[in-house]
Amino acid sequence: MTPLSTSALAKKRGTQAKALFDELTQAGFVIRENDAWVLTNAGSQAGGEYKESPKYGRYIVWPEDVEIKPAGKLLTASKLGEALNISARTLNQLLDELGWINKAVKGWKVTDAGKRVGGVQKEDNRSGIPYVAWNESILSSKALTDSVKQFLGVEAEATSTDNSISSFRQKFEAKHRSTDGHYVRSKAEMLIDNWLYMAGLVHAYERKLPVEEDVYCDFYLPAGKIYIEFWGLENDPKYADRKKIKQDIYKKYNFNLIELNDDDVQNLDDILPRLLLKFDVTAY
């Protein structure tokens, strides 16, 4: 069965495209982002996917028999925390680290990435303080459950579904010890890690991206929610394929990405402050 564009699906069902988009939005299958329609996790699970057209650019297609169910029950941070056995405060910190919410002057605001996984912006009727409620479908999010397991210290050996990534991590053992104690896979990564540490920037090494795809970044900076990738082995075809996969995922989710190569690593004092400033982050 050939997938149909939203307009074609609307025509097939005897309704207007606008009405169908409204129905998809209410079901939590799509959101409006930067004047474009974007699939949510629920929309992807329902069978929605992107197609590219030379004339119209990226658009969404659906199975002809897609079932558009009403959105599930909304959960507050307290209720979601109870379901995951953590406090609302800890939950919000994890959601912030995942890039799904941002701290407001008071309360929390949902990000575009948060909307894609079912976040809905709310406001307290009495105080006006913003908060985020979550579609109950978020409980099936692997990114969230993995984050909670890591915080709680639950052993959860991740098995990569991408053979190229899995073999790469096995081939290049993390044996270079950085100043802050991180063990990384190359001298270049060690120099980047050392620079971040000496600049006073909190960072994670090989942090899983908060997406359903099984992809890990080289470095992640919670401040600015910035991902850093060092591209080496440019002449290796398998590495080039892996690089393209990761770049496409960063682009798909509109993540803040800094890309470095061998020449950049030799000039980190000149390169990184300028690139970080683009995301409003400054080093000490």
Image (cartoon, helix red, strand yellow):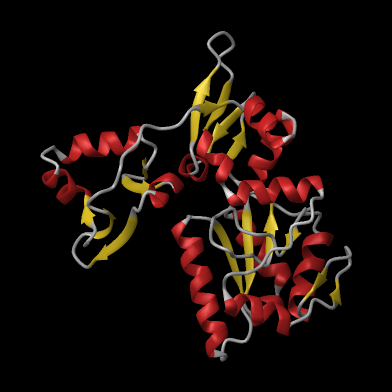
Taking 194 as reference, is 38 left or right?
A: left
Q: How many marks?
A: 0
Q: Position of residue 113 (x, y in %)?
A: 51, 46
User: Hey, which residue is sitting farthest top in the picture?
Assistant: 126
The residue positioned 25% from the left and 49% from the top of the image is 65
Q: Between residue 201 and residue 270, name the one nearer to us.
A: 201
Q: Position of residue 101 (x, y in %)?
A: 59, 38
Taking 2 as reference, is 188 left or right?
A: right
Above or below, 145 relative to 261:
above
Answer yes or no: is residue 195 visible: yes
Q: Position of residue 227 (x, y in %)?
A: 62, 60
Q: Position of residue 153 (x, y in %)?
A: 82, 50
Q: In the picture, residue 22 is in which quadrant?
A: top left
Above or below, 52 relative to 89:
below
The residue positioned 34% from the left and 57% from the top of the image is 49
Answer yes or no: is residue 222 visible: no
Above or below, 4 relative to 120:
below
Q: In the picture, residue 1 is in which quadrant?
A: bottom left
The residue positioned 69% from the left and 49% from the top of the image is 147
Taking 139 as reference, is 44 left or right?
A: left
The residue positioned 57% from the left and 73% from the top of the image is 162
Above or below, 257 relative to 38:
below
Taking 111 as reference, is 30 left or right?
A: left
Q: Between residue 258 and residue 134, name the one nearer to us.
A: 134
Q: Between residue 252 and residue 24, name the one nearer to us.
A: 24
